[in-house]
Amino acid sequence: MFDRETSRRHFIRYLAASPLLAHWGLSGCSPQGSSGPGSAAGAGGGDPALEARIAAVLDSPESAINLFDFEAMAEAVLPPAHWGYLVTGVDGDETRLANRTGFDRFQLRPRRLVDVSSVDMSVNLLGQDWPTPIVLSPVGSQRAWHEDGELAAARGSSARNHHQILSTVSTVSIEDVNAVRDVPAWYQLYPTSSWEVAQVLVSRAEDAGCDTLVLTVDLGVGSNRETLERLILTDTRDCTECHEAEAPSDDPMNFPTGWLERKPMFDGLDMSRVNFDTPFMDWEWVARLRSITDLRIVIKGIMRDDDAARCVAEGMDGIIVSNHGGRAEPSGRSTIEALPEVVDAVRGRIPVLVDGGIRRGSDILKAMAIGADAVCIGRPYIWGMACFGQAGVETVLGILTEELRVAMQLHGVASLGDLDRSFVTRG
């Protein structure tokens, strides 16, 4: 133990003085001039605040005891603007924080004298069997956190046999992601202001072997991400290589060219006068999408019972209860608290998944007892990726899986199929 701790302290001191911190997989952004939390500037100059933050750094993925260890290290090694993009919610982060504290409002009711010498954590999602209910949520721009980006997530999740949903604004193409996965990812579709762009994205997902679209419906206009804006102000790197200050013309509808160059799903498309503002999107738009593809459609962003019932009525194939990780509407309402009414409205007719705030195996057990068919995680696997790439992703999934197994045994649950609401109560 002494030798390991001594080695760990040496590693931390080395990291604090090393340019490794500045180059921790952040391809495309210059570290020069960095300052503020998580940056390299001053790391070798005895900055007490930064050195205290780096004290949470792990010397290997296996050193992590829980997911929060990866969170602490990711905050230490990432530049402030990149960390800000990952951690931010909207307004004062009330909805993001509610996603976590919402789990505290539910308690588990353990059942005793059940044979749990072995437990069955498997689930079936739209005809595909998985050994656990843990799915990787779509997170965009993953090469902002590690040079391998979505490939690290794809390889890590596939190695541990977990499903993955790929973002429209991925920094790796759907073709390249599916090439390293045993089972093709689901493809998340951000609608844009151009119907033609949506058609091309859907066609590429089909050609790449995807069988399911995940249509995100909770972010039709921009949101007020104050935490991101504040941390951007503390980041003094020269980031213009990746982030142009303005669009390449006077037309505010244009995406910055540099941004598009790192989003391969838009390669070859005319993105002039195209953006992500889609306040016009309604059920007629969804029906139009349904008419152009045979892929299954899962609606991501449902938070109330009547919308859930409408999803069933309109022939959708699944629902993800989500508020975009607290990055969309400033409702202050957690996804776990919205889950019961959505499950009740669906009545088992289509799968219901839930994301937002899941950090423990016991959180997964609560969600499954309420009626979820699977759960999705976002920020935690990015924390692992930021620290150790694919190995970090695998370790995050391994920790959650082991925590779920132990939670099932301690609460008398031999199979996830045995769960019902008798196992959970509201405090």
Image (cartoon, rainbow, N blue to C red):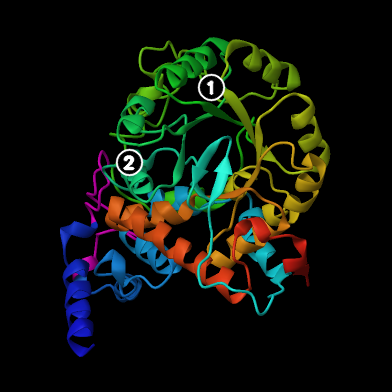
Q: Earlier in the sequence, mark 2 or mark 1?
A: 2
25 in magenta: yes
Q: Residue at x 35, y 65 (%)?
A: 73
Q: CA distance from mark 2 to mark 1?
A: 22 Å
34 or 425: nearer the viewer: 425
Secondary structure type for disc 2: helix
Crowding around mark 1 (Cα neighbors within 10 Å: few <14, some 14 to 19, many 20+) is some
Give the quadrant of the C terminus: bottom right
Q: State the image quarter where residue 408 is shown.
A: bottom right
Considering only vertical position in the picture, is 101 above or below 176?
below
Q: State the image quarter where residue 147 is shown.
A: top left
280 in magenta: no
Q: Nearer the viewer, mark 2 or mark 1?
A: 2
Query: Which residue carries the number 2 mark?
Result: 143
Q: Amino acid at mark 1?
A: Asn
Do residues under tags 2 and 1 come within 8 Å of each other at their CB atoms? no
Residue 170 percent across, percent down from the top left: 40, 33
Considering only vertical position in the picture, is 66 above or below 300?
below
Report the magenta residues as a range.
22-44
Q: Residue at x 74, y 21 (%)?
A: 283
